[in-house]
Image (tube, rainbow, N blue to C red):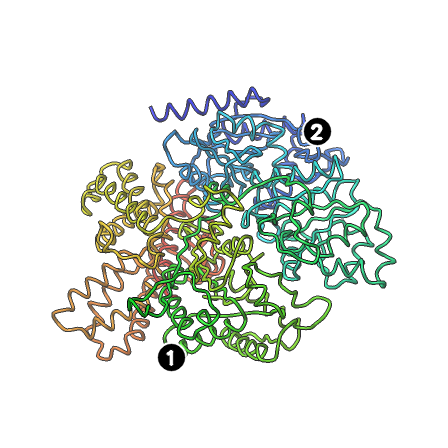
């Protein structure tokens, strides 16, 4: 019945696609796919290929990776005809995207490592460019996602590898439908719902999604205009719906009017990609002379240039100074990225005016990044006055309204006054609903007591005390530092993620840094703490209103370190020296370029999660994007856009383990938080944006535990599960429990005593869960595809970095020195611990043998690591020798292949491992089975003896 319902869905989808203009065609296999391709390319290009000419076409199509094939798809092609003539043709009409040939087929069978049959394929000019995988109603869409990943491994690259030309995948269980680009490195988190202009989801594949998204002209437009080929990472990226509508709105405005406008897309929603795509399309419009993308800090100038060039190699040149900028305005450069400071200099200083004035009447489109920050001074008016034929567009995650406008010499000015109407909105509630950003878990820490009342002798508790004397008292700062040190590992999943600590002033930052450094020297922590700051004279006054002031560019026209007084500069140099010692670098404040390089290096190391806590005043609280940052400690007054911008450093999506952005506020910011959320979304949004209190998650965990017991009443009952369906139910039930526990453990108040399940019981069930994972993932020789192959076990929710081989060796030292009557118990604890850690399970048998055979003979516990290393090296050599003898492999070649595998982090190919066999190679019929078995053994060897020793 279940198969029938999926088949009914498939048939209905194909029928609907036919009504939209797709020609239904029967393509059963690889051979039929190639025959159809020839006919469609001939029809599209209005030519005829001979068999030999078409072989040349197939040769073009066969070359390169998915990324390189995506380029081939879009390029004009050339072959030499049989008679010697040149023939030019195309695979896809990218300029007039509706003028292509559209077909739909289903149940195409391709045989690679395994035989796979695909659900519904959309062919454009005969090439499979859109692949749709369906699951019956009620099944997780993630299973369809995992199924496509399996096809990537097993068959998309087989034979002529035409399925590597797929640009967009669609996955659906009927009621929920998502799409994503062909990029096998992405996670399920990077799949998107399609929506209408008002961000209303079109989730049902038969009711809305297909007619809107898969309509031939629209899907062609997505492929031809709104897929970006990222040159840096060699991957395909596709725009999300709100990005699509924003770009379309800007393009329409440029085509049909001279009106300005702004895009309100919440922080963290991919503004750079949106602005790049808008810039790229506008710069190719004949009526536009230049597109100028304006940022307000040099670091953003550098970052944006880098990102734009990653989307399209060589699309722009960076501008190091105003002279270079003026040159770009004067030559054929179509797209310019610059800072507002350089742009202001270019139109203000006499030395540049003669060249710049030639452009005053040209049609120039300006796109302003983070326009809530940079557009409220004289410069905005100066740009509008200088360029007579300008058109201005702004991007912001937090617009300026009357409520959050800061008064300056020009009065209070709003985003609408400066840029006109909002062209598209995508607010934080939309992004959370779509799972494009995370919620915030906010904890308010620290209640202050006034001295006891003289009459009642009772301390009066007051939350809102905010006097400078109290806020900067050494006792308070010391308590906050201790709190951060006590809870940082919990907040960051044992430093899997990183944190930022923003404070009220440079003076306070210096006190905090010195406190952390002192405690480190006393051996109270080993966190890598870094800092950076510069400030202007009125910094504390600026902070008093709760807004993050605009950062002064540290290197612009002048090499000065603005506002840096002697005392704070000396402190900063000392802190940079500590940083240099920590990371073997050589930065200083001696010149502005070195300081700027320090800024960039800190940015890089935070993104790489090599810094545990970054201590700042204002820097990095806006415009900084790091998915690996999950916690913000706050000892600073924030409000409105400053608050949302700062909080939003923490809520970028990365994986299942990062379930929320953590905010730990040491000031009572609850009212300010509620006001900011209300301003930038609505009054009801607070429940959507802020995580619930710990009590709610305790209840959710206990409910999930009750559900787990219904599926498997005891730990041992997991062994009695008969069918894969039963095993799947257990996997889903325990996985849900893990997800909730992952959230719970980040709360400072978390304790197992509040839960209905004991910690040991959780560990026991976890061990059974891992047993099932091992069973599913290790059996590479089975022919039948298991439904469990499609399950994401989310092992990142289990992994704990501190439980590694080095940690186990410390426990062995404790075991060695323990009393006789405690040894058996401690030994069992160690073995159970290894059974519960996914990355140690392959090592368990060997470590157990070391405990039984070697540990009793060791007299000095200090030598355990040395003895273990000797034992491990011997076992590794034995296992390697055994592998090459049993499988008849050439020793040197095998050693090199393992080294290459470790270096490239790529599984060896079947042909590569078969080449290791000495003597007669296996027959064609046995090559697959033998090759897959060898790959499994080599990977198993590496997992056991090499991986998991860091830590």
**Circle 1 is placed at which residue position?**
522
Res 718 → quadrant: top left
Choose top left, top right, bottom left or bottom right for residue 810.
bottom left
Picture layout, residue 178 above or below residue 329: above
SS of the residue under disc 1? loop
Mark 2 Cα shell of 10 Å, populated few (<14), some (14-19), many (≥20): some
SS at mark 2 in the image: helix
Q: Quadrant location of the N terminus?
A: top left
Q: In the rendering, at what x and y percent does residue 233 appear?
A: 57, 52
Residue in the foreground of this view, choosing between 265 and 84: 265
Q: Is residue 557 left or right of residue 919?
A: right
Left/right of residue 789 with respect to residue 529 in the rendered view: left
Q: Residue at x 32, y 62 (%)?
A: 879
Which of 793/102 is in front? 793
Question: Residue 443: x and y, percent?
Answer: 39, 57
Task: Name the spot of residue 839 as percent of width and height, x first.
Answer: 34, 57
Q: Nearer the viewer, residue 46 or 911?
A: 46
State the residue position of label 2. Answer: 45
Cα distance in 3D space between marks 1 and 2: 75 Å
């Amino acid at each position: 019945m279940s198969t029938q319902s999926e088949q009914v869905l498939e048939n209905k989808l194909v029928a609907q696609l036919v009504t939209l203009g797709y020609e239904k065609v029967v393509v059963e296999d690889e051979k039929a796919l190639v025959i159809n391709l020839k006919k469609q390319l001939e029809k599209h290009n209005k030519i005829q290929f001979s068999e030999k000419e078409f072989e040349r076409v197939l040769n073009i199509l066969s070359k390169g990776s998915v990324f390189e094939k995506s380029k081939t798809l879009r390029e004009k092609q050339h072959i030499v005809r049989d008679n010697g003539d040149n023939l030019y043709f195309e695979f896809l009409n990218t300029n007039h995207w509706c003028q292509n040939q559209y077909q739909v087929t289903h149940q195409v069978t391709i045989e690679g490592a395994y035989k796979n049959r695909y659900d519904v394929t959309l062919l454009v000019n005969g090439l499979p460019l859109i692949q749709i995988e369906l699951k019956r109603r009620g099944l997780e869409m993630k299973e369809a996602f995992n199924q496509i990943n399996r096809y990537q491994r097993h068959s998309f690259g087989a034979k002529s590898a035409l399925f590597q030309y797929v640009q967009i995948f669609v996955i659906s269980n009927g009621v929920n439908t998502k799409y994503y680009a062909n990029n096998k490195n992405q996670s399920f988190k990077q799949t998107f719902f399609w929506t209408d202009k008002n961000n209303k989801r079109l989730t049902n594949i038969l009711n809305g999604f297909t007619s809107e998204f898969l309509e031939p002209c629209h899907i062609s437009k997505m492929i031809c205009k709104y897929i970006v080929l990222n040159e840096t990472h060699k991957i395909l990226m596709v725009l999300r719906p709100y990005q699509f509508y924003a770009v379309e709105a800007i393009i329409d405005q440029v085509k049909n009017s001279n009106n300005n406008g702004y895009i309100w897309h919440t922080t963290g929603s991919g503004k750079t990609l949106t602005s790049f795509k808008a810039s790229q399309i506008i710069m190719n419009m004949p009526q536009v002379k230049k597109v100028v993308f304006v940022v307000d800090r040099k670091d953003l100038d550098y970052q944006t240039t880098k990102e734009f060039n990653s989307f399209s190699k060589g699309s722009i040149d960076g501008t190091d100074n105003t002279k270079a900028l003026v040159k770009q305005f004067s030559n054929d450069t179509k797209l310019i990225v610059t800072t507002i400071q350089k742009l202001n200099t270019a139109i203000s200083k006499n030395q540049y005016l003669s060249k710049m004035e030639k452009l005053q009447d040209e049609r120039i489109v300006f796109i302003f990044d983070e326009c809530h920050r940079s557009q409220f001074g004289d410069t905005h008016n100066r740009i509008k006055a200088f360029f007579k034929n300008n058109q201005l567009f702004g991007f912001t995650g937090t617009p300026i309204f009357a409520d959050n406008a800061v008064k300056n010499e020009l009065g209070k000015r709003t985003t609408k006054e400066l840029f006109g109407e909002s062209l598209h909105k995508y607010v934080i509630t939309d992004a959370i609903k779509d799972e494009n950003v995370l919620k915030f878990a906010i904890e308010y820490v620290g209640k202050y007591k006034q001295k006891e009342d003289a009459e009642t002798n009772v301390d009066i508790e007051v939350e809102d005390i905010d006097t400078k004397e109290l806020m900067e008292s050494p006792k308070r700062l010391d308590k906050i530092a201790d709190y951060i040190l006590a809870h940082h590992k919990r907040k960051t999943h044992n430093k899997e993620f990183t944190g930022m600590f923003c404070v009220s002033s440079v003076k306070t930052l210096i006190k905090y840094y010195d406190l952390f450094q002192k405690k480190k020297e006393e051996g109270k922590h080993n966190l890598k703490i870094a800092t950076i700051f510069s400030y202007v004279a009125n910094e504390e006054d600026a902070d008093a209103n709760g807004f993050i002031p605009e950062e002064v560019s540290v290197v612009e026209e002048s090499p000065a370190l603005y506002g840096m007084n002697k005392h704070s500069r000396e402190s900063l140099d000392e802190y940079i020296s500590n940083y240099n010692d920590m990371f073997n670098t050589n930065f200083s404040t001696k010149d502005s370029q070195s300081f700027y390089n320090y800024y960039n290096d800190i940015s890089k190391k935070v993104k790489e999660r090599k810094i545990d806590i970054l201590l700042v005043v204002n820097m990095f609280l806006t415009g900084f994007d790091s998915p690996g940052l999950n916690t913000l400690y706050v000892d600073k007054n924030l409000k409105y856009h400053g608050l949302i911008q700062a909080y939003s450093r923490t809520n970028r999506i990365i994986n299942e383990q990062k379930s929320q952005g953590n905010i730990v506020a040491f000031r009572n910011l609850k009212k300010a938080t509620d006001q900011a959320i209300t301003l930038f979304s609505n009054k009801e949004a607070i429940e959507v944006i802020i995580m619930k209190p710990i009590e709610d998650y305790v209840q959710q965990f206990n409910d999930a535990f009750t559900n787990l017991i219904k599926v498997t009443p005891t730990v041992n009952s997991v062994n009695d599960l008969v069918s894969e369906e039963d095993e799947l139910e257990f996997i889903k039930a325990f996985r849900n429990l893990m997800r909730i526990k992952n959230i719970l453990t980040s709360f400072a108040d978390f304790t197992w005593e509040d839960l209905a399940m004991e910690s040991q019981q959780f560990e026991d069930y976890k061990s059974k869960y891992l047993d099932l994972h091992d069973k599913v993932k290790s059996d590479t020789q089975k022919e039948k595809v298991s439904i469990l192959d499609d399950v994401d076990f989310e092992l990142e929710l289990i992994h704990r970095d501190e439980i590694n081989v080095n940690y186990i060796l410390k426990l062995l030292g404790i075991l060695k020195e323990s009393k006789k009557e405690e040894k058996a118990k401690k030994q069992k604890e160690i073995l159970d611990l290894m059974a519960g850690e996914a990355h140690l399970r392959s090592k368990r048998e060997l470590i157990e043998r070391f405990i039984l055979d070697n540990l009793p003979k060791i007299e000095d516990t200090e030598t355990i690591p040395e003895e273990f290393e000797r034992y491990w090296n011997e076992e590794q050599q034995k296992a390697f020798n055994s592998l090459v003898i049993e499988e008849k492999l050439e020793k040197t070649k095998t050693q090199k292949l393992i080294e290459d595998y470790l270096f490239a982090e790529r599984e060896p190919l079947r042909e590569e491992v078969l080449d290791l066999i000495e003597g007669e190679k296996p027959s064609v019929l046995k090559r697959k089975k033998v090759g897959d078995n060898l790959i499994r053994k080599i990977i198993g060897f590496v997992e056991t003896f090499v991986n998991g020793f860091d830590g």
